[in-house]
Image: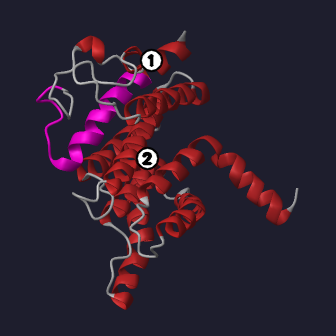
Amino acid sequence: MYSIIFFILGLIFGSFMNVLICRLPYGKSIVYPSSSCQTCGHKIRFYENIPILSYIFLKGRCSSCKTKISIQYPFVELATGFAFLFAYKYFGVSVLTLKMIVFLYLLLVIAFTDFFTSLDSDNFECGVIPVVLTRGGIVLGVILSLMVAPGLKTFLDSLIGILVGGLIIWLPGFIYQLITKKEGMGFGDVELLAMIGAFLGYKPLFLILMLSSIFGTIIGIPVILIKKDRNFPLPFGPFISIATIVYIFYGDFLVNLYLNTMFGG
C-alpha cells in the first residue's frame, strides 16, 4: 500500500514538475494561467491532466487540435514516480525519507530543466538552472538535515558542504576562464553542487564530481562526434544530478568496491 501511495504521489508531483520545467526558465508564473495547449491554446481540463492516464487516453495528442503531445510529460511523471518509490523502498517511512524525496525532486527538476533548455537554441545558448531551485534547495538542505539529525555538527556539515560544493567546481572554472578567456562552467552548476553539499555534507562531493565527469565523458563524446562540434555547449547539470542520485542509492556500494579494489579485502 505504501509503495502505491509513494508512486502515485511521485506521479502527481511529476506532473507539477513539468509546469516548473516549462515555465521557470522563461520567467513565467507557475500558478497562472492554467495549463493549455501550446499550439491551439486549448485549456487543459482536469481530467486531461491526470498523470500518465490522460496521455494514454488522449493517445498522446491534444483533444482539440490533435497536435502531438511531447513524450516529455509522461516521462518526467514516471521518473518522479519511481524516484519517490525507490526513496520509500530504501529509506522506509521517516523524516529521512522526506528529506531524500525533496532532494530527489530538486535534482530531477534541475536535471530536466537544464537538459530541455539546452535543446531550445532559439532562447538559450546552453542549458539553464533556475536560481530559485538551487538557492531554495540550499536553504531546504540545511533545514531538512537539521530535522533528521538536530545539532551543531549537522549544521556545520551542511555549511561546509555548501562552501566545498561551490568551490570544488567554481575554482577550476575560474582558473580555466583566466587562462582561456572562455567560460568553463556555468554558475548554475556551482550552486547545484553547493545545494548537494547542503543536503549531504562535503564528504560525498568528490565522488559525485568524479561520477558526473565519467557520465559526462561517456555521453558527451558521442554527442560531440555526432554534432561534429567540439564547442557544443553540453549542459553539465544533468550529469551532476544523475551522479548524485546514483550516490544516494549506491554510494556505500561504490565506496566499498573502490576500497576493496584498491586495498583488497
The crowd level at tag 1 (other Cα within 10 Å; few <14, some 14-19, many 20+) is: many
Q: Nearer the viewer, residue 57 or 147?
A: 57
Task: List the single residue furthest toward the bottom.
Answer: 179
The crowd level at tag 2 (other Cα within 10 Å; few <14, some 14-19, many 20+) is: many
Q: Position of residue 80 (x, y in %)?
A: 45, 31
Camera-nearest label, 1 or 2: 1
Q: Residue at x 71, y 47 (%)?
A: 253
Q: Main secondary structure of the magenta part?
A: helix
Q: Nearer the viewer, residue 101 or 50?
A: 50
Q: Please give left or right for residue 60 compared with residue 203 in the image.
A: left
Task: List the single residue furthest toward the left.
Answer: 33
Snapshot quadrant of residue 235 = bottom left
Q: Is residue 150 visible?
A: no
Q: Are marks 1 and 2 in contact (CB under 8 Å)?
A: no
Gap in Å between the C-alphas at discs 1 and 2?
Answer: 25 Å
Q: Please give left or right for residue 224 compared with residue 211 in the image.
A: left
Q: Residue at x 67, y 47 (%)?
A: 252
Secondary structure of the residue carrying tag 2 is helix
Residue bearing mark 1: 8
Q: Residue at x 23, y 49 (%)?
A: 25
Whether 25 is among the magenta residues is: yes
Q: Nearer the viewer, residue 80 or 161?
A: 80
Secondary structure of the residue carrying tag 1 is helix
Q: Residue at x 56, y 59 (%)?
A: 219
Q: Position of residue 58 (x, y in %)?
A: 36, 17
Compared with 60, 127 (above or below) is below
Q: Please give left or right for residue 182 compared with residue 30 in the image.
A: right
Q: Position of residue 129 (x, y in %)?
A: 31, 54
* Region in magenta: 10-34
- Residue 199's tag is 2
